[in-house]
Image (cartoon, helix red, strand yellow):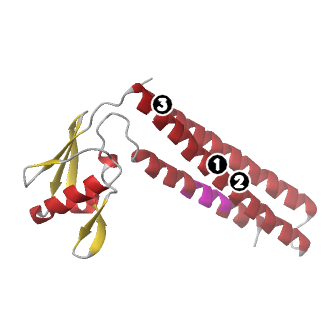
């Protein structure tokens, strides 16, 4: 496999890891109502597990309220059950057609715990980056061992992959800083 393909593949995997982190961050409470808090909760619908975002319209009319309007009102109770079973910690209020979730403000202690959780999630993504780099470097070493690339090409490729890792780690730091500021209300 050519060296540029190895680095491209590593970069793609890192971008996917960042995408996954962004999705996880969306589900973290910040004290403000956000559709991201509930859209990926799974509901049993006709025997299959389906995301709420596929079963209902989710809106946030104000900073402390999430309104869920199911496309099919017969599944309103199923959505309520799924929300109660999730780790969201918010009790749904339903009139049979709409589900309202009042998002309470977070206290200072809870904000700090969430910020710590965010750091842990970001660090796990950085570990994934290091694993991707290790795998790419192994691949490069194999190419060099099989005499498909020169030693200089191998070193340049490893430096390129290290640069990609560092760039993506900076990206993670920016994402973490933004979400932490949101949680801590800085």
Please tell me whether mark 2 sits on a helix, a strand or a loop. Answer: helix
Name the residue located 28 percent from the left edge and 38 percent from the top edge.
Answer: 33
Of the numbered discs in the image, which one, if any, rests on residue 112?
A: 3
Q: 116 or 163: nearer the eye?
A: 116
Rounded to the nearest angstrom, the CA distance separating label 3 from label 2 is 27 Å
Per the image, the residue denoted by label 1 is: 126
Name the residue located 45 percent from the left edge and 50 percent from the top edge.
Answer: 24
The residue range painted magenta reads: 10-16
Q: Is residue 153 above or below residue 170?
A: below
Report whether residue 175 is seen. Answer: no
Of the numbered discs in the image, which one, if any, rests on residue 130?
A: 2
Name the residue located 87 percent from the left edge and 56 percent from the top edge.
Answer: 155
Q: Position of residue 92 (x, y in %)?
A: 19, 47
Q: 39 or 159: nearer the eye?
A: 39
Q: Position of residue 8 (x, y in %)?
A: 67, 61
Q: Is residue 85 above or below residue 63?
A: below
């Amino acid at each position: 496999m050519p060296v540029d393909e190895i680095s491209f593949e590593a970069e793609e995997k890192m971008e996917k890891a960042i995408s996954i982190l962004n999705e996880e961050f969306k589900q973290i409470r910040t004290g403000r109502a956000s559709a991201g808090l509930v859209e990926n909760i799974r509901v049993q619908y006709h025997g299959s597990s389906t995301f709420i975002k596929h079963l209902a319209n989710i809106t946030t009319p104000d900073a402390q309220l999430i309104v869920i309007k199911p496309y099919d009102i017969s599944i309103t109770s199923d959505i309520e059950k799924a929300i109660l079973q999730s780790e969201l910690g918010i009790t749904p209020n339903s009139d049979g057609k709409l589900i309202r979730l009042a998002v309470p403000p977070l206290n200072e202690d809870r904000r700090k715990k969430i910020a710590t959780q965010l750091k842990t999630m970001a660090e796990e993504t950085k570990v994934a980056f290091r694993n991707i780099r290790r795998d790419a470097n192994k691949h490069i070493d194999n190419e060099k061992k099989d005499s498909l690339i020169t030693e200089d090409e191998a070193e340049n490729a490893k430096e390129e992959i290290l640069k990609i890792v560092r760039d993506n780690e900076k990206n993670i730091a920016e994402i973490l800083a933004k979400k932490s500021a949101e949680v801590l209300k800085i």
